[in-house]
Amino acid sequence: MSHPSVSLPCGLLGHADLPPAIMVLGTSSDAGKSLIAAGLCRLFARRGLNVAPFKSQNMALNSAVTDDGKEMGRAQALQARACGLRPDVRMNPVLLKPQSHTGSQVIVLGEARGHYRVREYEQLKPALFREVCEAYASLAQGRDLMILEGAGSPAEINLKATDLANARMAREARARMILVGDIDRGGVFASLVGTLALMEAWERDMVDGLLLNKFRGDASLLPPALDAVTALTGKPFLGVVPWVEKLLLPEEDSVAYRAGRILRREPGGGQGDARTEAPEDELDVVLVDLPYLSNLSDLDPLLAEPGVRVRAAKCPDELGDPALIILPGSKCTASDLRTLRESGMETALRAEAEREGGADILGICGGMQMMGKYIADPEGLEDAAGHVEEGFGLLPLVTTLTSGKILRRATARDEILGLPLTVYEIHHGRTELFGPQSPAGAAEGLPQVWTRTANGEEHGWMREQEGGKGALWGTYGHGLFDDDTWRCAFLNRLRRRRGKSARGVTPCSPDASLERLADVLETHLDMERLCAGLESRGF
């Protein structure tokens, strides 16, 4: 996809003709910046404005694939949808995908530039910032409004000199800033005051106001604290956004999941105890936790599905007796495989596969690679060049990791359920069957082709086991559960096997949630003050 070229002056965006802009900052990661930005995108888009989202730099293992086969942050893909736009890599020009505690794969405008350790990346940032500004200027052309999102906290004073995503970008875009604090986690007033105190004077001048997010309780108790913070900082509160139950929108990354908030039952919370049996007509689904778990958003539709409990397990004792075990995607497949081996989870999964009445096991992308016979790394992408990691041996598959990354959206077909699918792929490996494949397939206990692309390419396999054992599934297709009809059919297959009643289709489009989020913001934000801050910008 070609984009309009932009000639930047020496001051980068200093003299560009730019539309009004709002930047949503947070006192910390997981303060709710992404969803507040998404809600603002929908709110202004439905007022008839041509609005687009932007985040200079995003660190996330949840990513999306654009129509032209490039990679970007999933949060910005959601925000694009909120604006009524297709995802565009200019909305998230720099994406970091952690591969270790000290390094990440760096993706620029949808394409991988390589793996950089932290100090190496710091040296790269000045050059990247020009590309970030070029992307912004190109994307902003002809827009009525831009909604920017910051990264982490603007008060990371050790990183400010080369910051790409917070006040420095807001200054280039001439955006007014909103500072969001998460009141649900506690200490929010100190966080707001402390963040502003650590900002430079020019940064504070750009902050139009403060916002409390995820509030649960009696709002009449807040005014003394709000007044005190305003007196200390000189910044008014633009609103208090309540906790919104059953908001079926993907989290930006696994921060909330690690805190135990994504995989929970609504209402109330709590993942539940693995030793506690699920209610009689409920399906128990277990996600195998991984240090470098990626694209956790694959499970989002299951969290909205009535009669399904989703929980996480790190060790064998937490598996319980589920109907389905999901091995998710991984950014470091061989490393995560070794972690599962060391924890005893590999042995437990093999035993589960051989147990009468055991769970079905589904591997997605890296999870499928783990289920195979081995993973070869001839180019040294994850280990030493030529390393071969033994897999779990649940499916007769072999994977070869290659430097060429496969990024695509694919129309596929489920050969087992006989249904069409639209999925997306993000992976380095190429996987194929090990040994002969019999046309009899299921009758002989050999794997059958499960998912196949429109051009006939196989990218998923399934093995139906005899003796009451669970089926083994593996596919490269992310986003399987997004399809309401397919999700219903797959879950009903599990229900029949467990002697449970079938259920009907549950719609799970994010648009209804985006509308509800926009309604909440319109009700609880001081929209007059928010828009007044943009009047001088021609809003």
Image (cartoon, grey):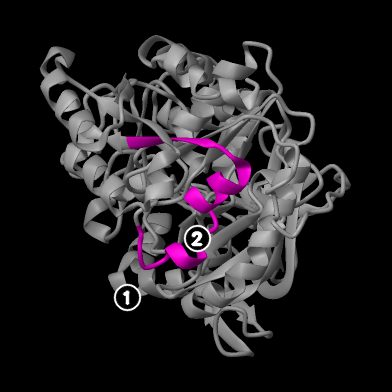
Question: What x and y, as percent, mark residue 313?
Answer: 30, 52
Residue 162 shown in magenta: yes
Instruction: Identify the residue at image location x=29%, y=58%.
Output: 314
Residue 426 location in percent, x, y? 66, 56
Q: What stretch is highlighted in magenta?
A: 156-180
Note whether residue 66 is visible: no
Q: Nearest the camera: 361 or 83? A: 83
Q: Where is residue 302 in the image (x, y as percent from the top left)?
A: 45, 32
Is 138 displayed left or right of 285 in the figure?
right
Above or below, 155 against 405 in this view is above
Residue shown at 58% from the left, 65% from the top = 369
> Residue, x 53% and y 49% (percent of image)?
62
Q: Is 465 left, or right, of 270 in this rendering?
A: right
User: Residue flagged by tag 1: what amino acid is it?
Assistant: Glu
User: On the image, numbered disc 1 is attached to which residue?
Assistant: 342
Q: Give the camera-side residue of 226 and 314.
A: 226
Q: Which residue is drawn at 81% across and 46% down?
A: 68
What quarter of the picture does the C terminus occupy? top right
Q: How crowded is mark 1: few (under 14 residues within 10 Å), some or many (20 or more)?
A: few
Judged from the image, the secondary structure of the residue bearing numbered disc 1 is: helix
Q: Mark 2 points at which residue?
A: 163
- Is 504 a magenta residue? no
Specify the amino acid type for callout 2: Asp
Q: What crowding class fits label 2: few (fewer than 14 Cα within 10 Å), some (14-19), or many (20 or more)?
A: many
Among the 4 quarters of the image, the one containing residue 291 = bottom left
